[in-house]
Amino acid sequence: MAAPLLSLYRRFIRWPAGNWLFSRAVCFKAPYFASISPTITRLEPGRCEGVIRQRRRISNHIGTVHAIAMCNLAELVAGVMVDATLPVDMRWIPKGMEVKYQAKALGVLKAVATPALPIVSATAGYDLPVEVSVTDAAGNEVFHATIAMWVSPRPSRTG
């Protein structure tokens, strides 16, 4: 059985503008991400891709995409990927992020999130590093993040 978020994505992408609608639904659930107007373009177990396009409101004083906008994109695609991949008996939360700004970020930026370790069900919590690469339209990596996720069992609902 697919994770609920992955099932939702699969339903949405059948429609015209399905990726855009799915992305709006994610931003409705986590409103802060709407500030970068992201679009999730691909979602499957172990991989999420998303894009943002450069606009004035996410640009900095030197005319490039602001570093924090890229951090937001990285956290979004990492979280969506983990949520869509985790077994239903597990939950996650980000613990930290290490970032590297590689080059000036201009135009449309594509982020790809993949887990550094297999995502599994477990009886105890574990650290899960997620790698996120952000590239420009030419395929040059402009930003890289390693996001530390804490994955743990959901509390049992007995009682």
Image (tube, grey):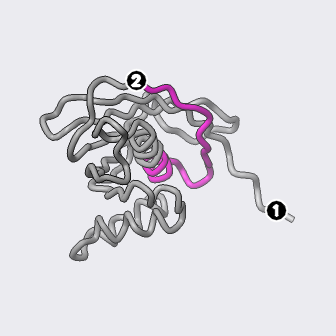
Left or right: residue 142 compared with residue 130? left
Q: Is residue 134 above or below residue 4?
A: above
Which residue is under mark 1? 158
Amino acid type at mark 1: Thr
Front in this rendered view, residue 30 or 102: 102
Q: Is residue 140 magenta?
A: no
Query: Residue sitting at 41 percent across and 60 percent down?
Result: 6
**Number of marks in the rendered image:** 2
What residue range appears in magenta? Answer: 79-100
Pick the quarter of the image with the C terminus: bottom right
Which label lies toward us, 1 or 2?
Answer: 2
Q: Relative to residue 133, is residue 120 drawn left or right?
A: right
Q: Is residue 40 above or below residue 24?
A: above
The residue lying at 42 percent from left, 30 percent from top is 145
Hey, what amino acid is under mark 2? Lys
- Residue 2's spot in the image, x, y percent? 43, 59
Q: Is residue 90 magenta?
A: yes
Q: Nearer the viewer, residue 46 or 53?
A: 53
What residue did someone put label 2 on? 100
Q: CA distance from mark 1 to mark 2?
A: 44 Å
Task: Identify the disc placed on residue 14.
Answer: none
Residue farthest to the left, as pictured: 138
Residue neighbourhood size for the residue with mark 1, other residues' Cα within 10 Å, grouped as few (<14), some (14–19), many (≥20): few
Location of the N terminus by quadrant is bottom left
Q: Secondary structure at mark 1?
A: loop
Q: Is residue 114 above or below residue 154?
A: above
Q: Residue at x 12, y 35 (%)?
A: 138
Q: Quadrant of residue 34?
A: bottom left
Using a 10 Å C-alpha cutoff, classify the residue at mark 2 as few (fewer than 14 neighbours), some (14 to 19) or many (20 or more): few
Mark 2 secondary-structure assignment: strand
- Residue located 49% across and 47% down the image: 79
Q: Earlier in the sequence, mark 1 or mark 2?
A: 2
